[in-house]
Every structure is written in structure tokens, then in C-alpha cells.
Image: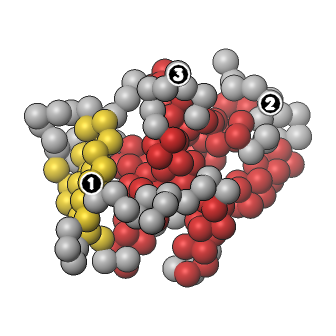
């Protein structure tokens, strides 16, 4: 079976939100995985602290390993990322995702890399961003934040507030806002 194209990501993530009747952020990715029958295993990955997570498909079980030593926001993104592999790349049985430095995250999210990350990793990151920060919700919440802050005095505070509401990192939120065209440039 071939991997699904990036165009399917929005439709697929919206179908999960609808299927599990998720009314508002934060999206409970751990509960989605559990309800899909994926066994979540949290461990510190002491031998390789850069390891963020893994997805392993066996005959009749699917397990997801999550680095418990990483922050909650990172764990949520990792679960969403591994769900991306689960849905978008069903033919591969094992995915092992190394953590990366913050300077490289935008490359993994946007696909603008020099070949350091595969198309499958970019697709999984786009899936994770779309699942954790659905475009429709984020556009609505961003517009509401703009209305409440008519002079747009503290853009950083608005972005931090949205990141907290969606339980994602500040960097993931900025990248998603840029990707959706809600921000023109990254805050300094």
C-alpha cells in the first residue's frame, strides 16, 4: 500500500476530530491512540535521550513508545506524529523518530530541508500539526485574539496564549500560524 499524499492530511485529521467528537482544543491525542487500540508505552529512553518516539506494528498489536523524559508538549507532538505514520504510511512496520534541535524543527515541519528528513517525516509532522492545531479552530481563535487585542500590542503574548490553549510548544504554534498564513513573519 502506498503512502497517502499530504493533501489527505487535513481531511484525515478532521475525520479523527469528528469521529472522536472532540469539541475544542486541546486534542487528546493519547486518548485517540488508545481508542484506536494503540498501546502507549512511556519510558525515558535513557540510552538515547534524543529519541522522541517510535511506532511498532506487530501481527495483531500496535505499540507507540514515547520518551517520558521529554516535556508534555513534546510528548503530545510525538504521539500525533506517530499517529501520522500510523495512518499515512501503513506499509511500514517500524518508525523510530529521533529528537532534533530546535533550529531544525521548521525544516521537518515545512519540508524545506536539504534532504535531512524524508518526505514521510514531513508528512507525519504536517499530520501532527493539523491534528493538534486544526486550521479552522486556530483561525477562529487567532481572529478572536486579534479582536480582543485590537492594537496588537503584544503578539508574543497572543501566540503564547494559543500555544498554552492547544498544549503545543511555542515553536510549533508559530510554525503552524505561518503555515496557515495567519502570521506573515515569525516574531523576533
Say the numbered circle drawn on residue 94: 1
Say the numbered circle drawn on residue 184: 2
- The mark nearer the N terminus, 1 or 2, is 1
User: Tag 1, which secondary structure?
Assistant: strand
In the rendered image, the residue lying farthest to the top is 188
In the image: residue 141, left or right of residue 91:
right
Residue at (82% x, 51% y) in the render? 143
Q: Quadrant of residue 4?
A: bottom right
User: Tag 3, which secondary structure?
Assistant: loop
Q: Quick one: quadrant of the C terminus?
A: top right
Q: Quadrant of residue 23?
A: bottom right
Residue 98 rendering spot, x and y as whole percentages: 31, 36
Residue 47 rendering spot, x and y as whole percentages: 11, 34
Q: Quick one: quadrant of the N terminus?
A: bottom left
Q: Which residue is mark 3?
A: 114
Say the numbered circle drawn on residue 77: none
Residue at (80% x, 30% y) in the render? 184
- The mark nearer the N terminus, 3 or 2, is 3
How would you rate the neighbour count of disc 1 (Cα within 10 Å): few for under 14, some for 14-19, many for 20 or more?
A: some
Depth check: give the residue in front, 167 or 106: 106
Depth check: give the residue in front, 135 or 96: 96
The count of marks equals: 3
Q: CA distance from mark 3 to mark 2?
A: 23 Å
Q: CA distance from mark 1 to mark 2?
A: 37 Å
In the image: residue 116, left or right of residue 182:
left
How would you rate the neighbour count of disc 2 (Cα within 10 Å): few for under 14, some for 14-19, many for 20 or more?
A: few
Residue at (37% x, 62% y) in the render? 91
Amino acid at each position: 500500500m502506498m503512502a497517502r499524499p499530504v493533501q489527505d492530511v487535513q481531511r484525515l485529521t478532521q475525520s479523527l476530530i469528528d469521529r472522536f467528537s472532540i469539541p475544542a482544543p486541546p486534542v487528546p491525542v493519547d486518548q485517540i491512540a488508545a481508542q484506536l487500540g494503540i498501546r502507549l508505552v512511556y519510558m525515558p529512553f535513557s540510552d538515547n535521550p534524543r529519541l522522541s518516539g517510535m511506532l511498532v506494528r506487530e501481527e495483531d498489536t500496535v505499540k507507540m513508545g514515547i520518551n517520558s523524559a521529554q516535556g508534555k508538549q513534546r510528548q503530545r507532538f510525538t504521539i500525533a506524529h506517530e499517529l501520522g505514520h500510523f495512518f499515512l504510511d501503513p506499509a511500514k512496520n517500524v518508525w523510530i523518530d529521533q529528537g532534533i534541535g530546535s533550529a531544525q524543527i521548521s525544516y521537518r515541519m515545512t519540508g524545506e530541508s536539504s534532504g535531512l528528513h524524508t518526505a514521510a517525516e514531513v508528512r507525519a509532522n504536517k499530520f501532527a500539526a493539523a491534528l493538534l492545531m486544526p486550521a479552522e479552530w486556530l483561525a477562529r481563535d487567532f481572529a478572536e485574539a486579534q479582536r480582543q487585542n485590537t492594537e496588537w500590542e503584544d503578539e508574543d503574548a497572543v501566540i503564547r496564549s494559543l500555544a498554552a490553549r492547544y498544549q503545543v510548544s511555542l515553536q510549533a504554534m508559530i510554525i503552524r500560524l505561518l503555515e496557515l498564513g495567519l502570521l506573515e513573519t515569525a516574531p523576533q
